[in-house]
Structure formats: structure tokens, C-alpha cells
């Protein structure tokens, strides 16, 4: 494994990006994209928690097995982020596996959060950043 990533939590809250750490076995082998993506993924989790869109109850496996984009037939968008997108992306980052070449999550977030709060706008901007990073 090239790098191991972890986030520090206090209670139920993910602590801000400055406490997210990456331990590199050989820094010269780590692609900057993986590091930036890992930090952005932790920020998504932090924002979902701050917006009270974080669940401590994982959906049943058949719900997670949806073949629809964003699992629209079984999950809310924020559940898809938490239970499908974030875990899969963290696995890819930790394994330094090939990343998706195209990503368009922000438009779905815009639809889901339309007419919403400042925090939702910030989450959308963060997802736009992830889209841009992965669509290099």
C-alpha cells in the first residue's frame, strides 16, 4: 500500500481538515490527486455531518445493491454519498487504484439541494471540485 489515510474524530463529529492526516510510506510514489481527493472526501463527510445528513444506520445490502445511477430507486442522494460513493472512493484512494475518469456528482447535488441552505451550496461546490479533479 502506498499510503494510509485516516481522520480524527471526536465524539460523533469528524474534525476539520487540518486534523486529517496522511502517512506516506514513500512520498515520491504518492500522486497528488489521491491526496487531494482523500482530503475532499473527508470534507464531504464533515459537511454531511454538519448538515445532519449523516446516518448511523446502514441500509440493508439489497438497498445498496441498486443498479440505478445514484441508487435513485432505493436511496436518498445523501445516503448514496455516505454509503456508496464515499466508501468506494476511499477504497480506491487507499489502494491507489485507478480512479473514475469522468465524474458528474455536482449536478445531482444541485437538483437534490435546490432552494437550500448555504451549507448545501458549499457541499455542491466541494462536489464540483471532486468532479473537476476526477475529470482531468
Image: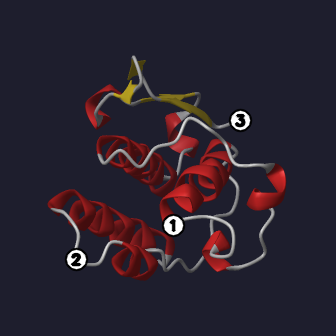
Among the two numbered marks 1 and 2 on one chain, the one whose residue lies closer to the N terminus:
1
Residue for badge 2:
115
Give the residue at x 39% y 17%: 11
Q: Residues within 10 Å of mark 3 (few under 14, many from 20)?
A: few
Q: Is residue 61 above or below residue 115?
A: above
- Label 2 residue SS: loop
In x, y percent, where is residue 134? 50, 71
**Left or right, 111 with reference to 88:** left
Residue for badge 3:
1
Give the residue at x 70% y 48%: 59
- Total numbered labels: 3
Residue for badge 1:
77
Q: Is residue 128 above or below residue 17?
A: below
Q: Is residue 127 above or below residue 56?
A: below
- Label 3 residue SS: loop
- Nearer to me, 126 or 32: 126
Q: Which color scheme does this rendered protein use? A: secondary structure
- Nearer to me, 106 or 30: 106
In x, y percent, where is residue 25? 59, 28
Q: Disc 3 or disc 1, which is closer to the eye?
A: 1
Distance CA(mark 2)–CA(mark 3): 43 Å
- Looking at the rendered image, the quarter that the N terminus falls into is top right
Amino acid at each position: 500500500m502506498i499510503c494510509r489515510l485516516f481522520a480524527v474524530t471526536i465524539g460523533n463529529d469528524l474534525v476539520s481538515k487540518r486534523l486529517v492526516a496522511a502517512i506516506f510510506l514513500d512520498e515520491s510514489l504518492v500522486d497528488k490527486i489521491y491526496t487531494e481527493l482523500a482530503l475532499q472526501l473527508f470534507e464531504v463527510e464533515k459537511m454531511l455531518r454538519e448538515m445532519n445528513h449523516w446516518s448511523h444506520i446502514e441500509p440493508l445490502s439489497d438497498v445498496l445493491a441498486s443498479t440505478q445511477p445514484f441508487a435513485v430507486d432505493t436511496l436518498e442522494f445523501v445516503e448514496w454519498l455516505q454509503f456508496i460513493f464515499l466508501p468506494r472512493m476511499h477504497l480506491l484512494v487507499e489502494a491507489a487504484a485507478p480512479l473514475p475518469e469522468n465524474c458528474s456528482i455536482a449536478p445531482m447535488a444541485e437538483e437534490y439541494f435546490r432552494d437550500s441552505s448555504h451549507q448545501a451550496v458549499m457541499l455542491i461546490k466541494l462536489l464540483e471540485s471532486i468532479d473537476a479533479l476526477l475529470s482531468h
